[in-house]
Amino acid sequence: MNLKLIAALTMTVALVGCVTSETRPPPKVVAKQATVHIPESELLDVGIRVFDPGIPKNIENDDEALAKKRIYPDLRKAEARYIPTLLRETLEGTAQWGAVRVIPESADFVDVIVTGQLVDSNGGFLAIDVTAVDAAGRVWIKDKRYSSMVDLGAYKTTASLKARDPFQNVYSEVANDLVLARDKLTSLDRENIRKVASLRFAEDLAPDAMAGMTAKDKNGIVQVARLPAEGDPTLGRIERIRERDTAVVDTVNDYYASFHDSIEDSYGSWRQTSFTELEKEMRARSSARTRTVLGAAALIASIFAPNSCSTYDSCRINNAMRNAGTMGGIAAVLSGIKKYADARTHADALKELTLSFQSEVAPQVVEVEGHTLRLSGTAEDQYREWRKLLKQLYQEETGTAAAPPPAAPAAPATTTTTTGVAPPPSG
């Protein structure tokens, strides 16, 4: 009876070793394309802020705890810049919107603003939480989770990886939900959103002159309360200043586009290799558990099998089977231990790949109208300073400022290219 058990366990181990998993590609989601002409007065601009990298506050300084969760802060911060550009490209490709940009955190006066947080990201799975709000205060999408398994077809060749992102389904689903939310609004609602965005910029820049232009209705939605008189010189000045601000935001958007292009190849390779390493690790751990448990079971069964032989020959056969079961169990346990070691090796390889990628995503410097924006951890502060400068320019033009705007701090020596993007300063 016990010998039959050993034989069954041994066969199970052998069968487990033959099992392979197959990852089926998810059905492709296509972003909905515009099929009718959208009037200019209803064509909404979209601003996508850099995502929250999703690094848990309670372990953000604990490298070991972060590594166990496969969270590498520098990589996450790079992805938080990279993924919004993929969403921007998806929205632009639908012809459903006006200007679509990746914007600084403090750029508030856009028709529709999309924010997001990374939940999980590796070569095999992506999950993000997304919120979208329009300038009038309507919530289009509220903290909705979008996720997808990898489309392995994207990993077949370098060309296929460039042709379609492995997680394009996520961006297409977000794009389709935005269109769905927009289409629930009336034409007047959409026109109001555009006007409110413009008037809110004016109220922020010149609160005294432009106060009371907007007001919330009983539902908390911002509506146009009154419009400036036609030909109002104050409004003309504000519109010119807004054009300067838009140029700055465009340059910030160009920076993120350049950042995307600069890391696209290395990031795609990282994702592909990351998926391979994760798959190997999961298989190794699964095989290790199976071999260790079944090996131990076979070992125990062979040791404690009763000696029920009645003749010399039957005893020899019984002892041989017992020894075979013992040796097989020991071999299975040792094989399981080796598989655990292999799993740790793959995990270490993944960490090395991540660290290698992190070294390729150094911050860059962008020149905008004589001002240097270092778009890394200080990019937001730089844009806030730019907003202050715009207000000072307005005050100077209207004669409400006693002194001219302070000179911008000396910019580090850089070589500006025709695209306005310069390499980071040395050191």
Image (tube, rainbow, N blue to C red):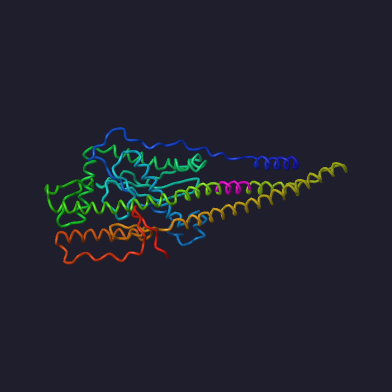
Q: Give the dominant element type of the magenta stretch: helix, strand or loop.
A: helix
Outermost right residue: 312
Q: Indicate left or right for 64 with 198 as reference.
A: right
The residue positioned 28% from the left and 33% from the top of the image is 36
Q: Indicate left or right for 27 with 211 as reference.
A: right
Q: Nearer the viewer, residue 294 or 385?
A: 385
Q: Where does the image place residue 225, in percent across and percent down from the top left?
A: 16, 47
Q: Where does the image place residue 111, in percent across and percent down from the top left?
A: 27, 46
Q: Height in image: 411 above or below 17?
A: below
Q: Where does the image place residue 294, in percent across and percent down from the top left?
A: 67, 46
Q: Indicate left or right for 380 with 159 as reference.
A: left
* Image quadrant where one finds the C terminus: bottom left
The quarter holding residue 209 reads bottom left
Q: Indicate left or right for 379 with 393 as reference.
A: right
* Image quadrant where one finds the N terminus: top right
Q: Height in image: 258 above or below 157?
A: below
Q: Height in image: 418 above or below 16?
A: below
Per the rendered image, the range of residues in magenta is 278-287
Number of labels in the image equals 0
